[in-house]
Image (cartoon, rainbow, N blue to C red):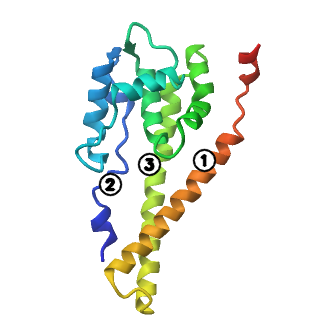
């Protein structure tokens, strides 16, 4: 069983770069089209939608995005939507909103250059892809070792063992992210209540 063959089309390093975002404000349909063209390879099946009008409206209503002007989305809005896209599959919308609250406030007050922050995020994600590749290699070696001991003699059992490992690690990371959200303190939080 070659795990790399099974996982080769994951497109883990597929991220929306700031250079791919036009320097003009976009209407919602254009934003959806941009995300669909960039992330369509990340969909599990063809029926799945990367981004919908309802999703974007819910992000705006939930204050995950600073206010939209004239029904057009700026480059900063699109960068935020890209971060939401990554976070929403793991965290609740409420947790995503709490995580991005300070960023939204700072961007709307012109106290944060979001593109620079986003570039840092992209560098972290590049590193994460390398770490993931190392993890996969280690897991494959571990499964081979078990196979040599005849614990998991079939490809099916090896695959289930890997699925259990991946979901276990996913849960570890999700729980760590939730714990960080629970303990997240934004410096200007109290100023909003005044």
**Label 3 environment density (alpha carbons within 10 Å; few <14, some 14–19, many ≥20):** some
The residue that mark 2 highlights is 10
Q: How far apart are marks 1 and 3 (CA)?
A: 19 Å
Task: Tally the marks.
Answer: 3
Q: Is residue 190 above or below residue 152?
A: above
Quadrant in the picture for the N terminus: bottom left
**Picture residue at 40% right of the left edge, 21% below the top:** 75
Quadrant in the picture for the C terminus: top right
**Picture residue at 24% right of the left edge, 43% below the top:** 47
The residue that mark 1 highlights is 177
Mark sitting earlier along the chain (1/2): 2
Q: In this view, does 132 lie above or below 191?
A: below
Q: x and y percent of residue 102 in the render?
A: 63, 26
The residue that mark 3 highlights is 126
SS for callout 2: loop
**Picture residue at 32% right of the left edge, 54% below the top:** 10
Q: x and y percent of residue 141 in the render?
A: 43, 78
Q: Is residue 112 left or right of residue 10?
A: right
Q: Distance between the residues labelled 1 and 2?
A: 22 Å
């Amino acid at each position: 069983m070659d795990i790399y063959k099974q996982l080769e089309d994951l497109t883990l390093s597929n991220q929306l770069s700031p250079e791919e975002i036009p320097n003009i404000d976009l209407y919602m349909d254009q934003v959806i089209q941009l995300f669909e063209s960039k992330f369509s390879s990340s969909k599990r099946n063809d029926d799945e939608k990367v981004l919908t009008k309802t999703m974007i409206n819910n992000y705006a209503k939930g204050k995950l995005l600073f206010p939209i002007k004239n029904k057009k989305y700026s480059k900063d809005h699109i960068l935020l939507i890209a971060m939401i896209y990554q976070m929403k599959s793991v965290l609740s919308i409420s947790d995503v909103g709490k995580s991005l609250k300070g960023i939204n406030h700072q961007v709307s007050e012109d106290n944060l250059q979001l593109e620079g922050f986003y570039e840092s995020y992209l560098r972290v994600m590049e590193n994460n892809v390398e770490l993931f590749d190392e993890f996969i290699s280690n897991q494959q070696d571990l499964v081979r070792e078990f196979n040599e001991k005849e614990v998991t003699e079939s490809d099916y059992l090896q695959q289930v063992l890997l699925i259990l490992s991946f979901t276990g690690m996913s849960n570890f990371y999700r729980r760590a992210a939730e714990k960080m959200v629970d303990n997240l303190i934004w410096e200007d939080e109290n100023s909003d209540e005044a």
